[in-house]
Image (cartoon, grey):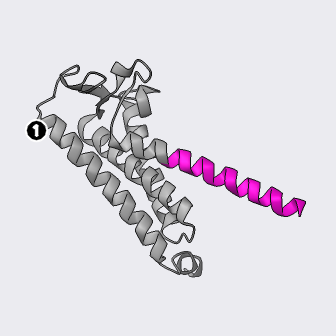
Amino acid sequence: MDKLRAHFTPLYTSLGLKGLGLAVIVLILDQLTKLGVLYGLNLQAIGDQVNILPFFSLTMVHNQGISFGLLTSGGLGRWLLVLFQFGMGLALMDYVRTQTNAWLTVSLGLIIGGAIGNGIDRFRLGYVVDFLDFSGTHVFPWVFNVADSGICIGVALLVWYFIRADLTAKHKDAA
């Protein structure tokens, strides 16, 4: 019981709450945009499309894998991904709630919101709704969503955080 009490003391920091708030914002934006595409624009079938610009369209894709269609799986794989996404989301929520580093808090908030957003889709529908299609650029062929963006930007910021921390540590060692 003492270990549990020590783990949850403090319950959260001000910055940790902001990180959790960012996760909620990403989650809400993700789910609202998906609902808008599914039911507002009525893009239900794979390949349904609304052209917005010559290089950008809203194109319905049912992604059964992880980000950008990697590791496609159904059946048991679907439920393992659901457990992984919600498990990671909860673990990161527990970690971010007491953070005092803004860079780390922002990156984790983006990842949490994205992981839970895609996890909700996979749980509810059996696939993740992807619809942002920049394939007209002939540079980026993947169709993605707000949650994927949150995850990718969060991971990029996290990598930069660790590179910066490593460079700072090396600089201190050299001094």
Of residues 52 and 111, the one nearer the viewer is 52
Residue 30 position within the rendered picture, expressed as x and y whole percent measured from the top left: 29, 46
What residue appears at the point 45 percent right and 50 percent down from the top-left corner?
A: 111
Q: Nearer the viewer, residue 89 or 99?
A: 99
Image quadrant for the C terminus?
Answer: bottom right
User: Tag 1's secondary structure?
Assistant: helix
> What is the magenta range?
154-175
Q: Is residue 170 magenta?
A: yes
Q: Amino acid at mark 1?
A: Gly
- Above or below, 41 against 114 in this view is above
Toward the viewer: 88 or 145? Answer: 145
The quarter holding residue 59 reads top left
Residue 1 sits in quarter? bottom right
Residue farthest toward the right in the current orientation of the protein: 174
Image position of 29 with respect to 13: above or below: above
| Residue 90 included in the magenta stretch of the image | no
Locate residue 79, reporting x and y percent: 38, 38
Q: Main secondary structure of the magenta part?
A: helix
The relative height of residue 171 versus residue 72 in the rendered view (above or below) is below
Up/down of 5 relative to 132, above or below: below
Q: Which residue is mark 1?
A: 40
Residue in the picture at 44% in, 21% down:
139
Q: Nearer the viewer, residue 4 or 72?
A: 72
Q: Is residue 104 left or right of residue 163?
A: left
Count of labels in the image = 1
Q: Answer yes or no: is residue 83 visible.
A: no
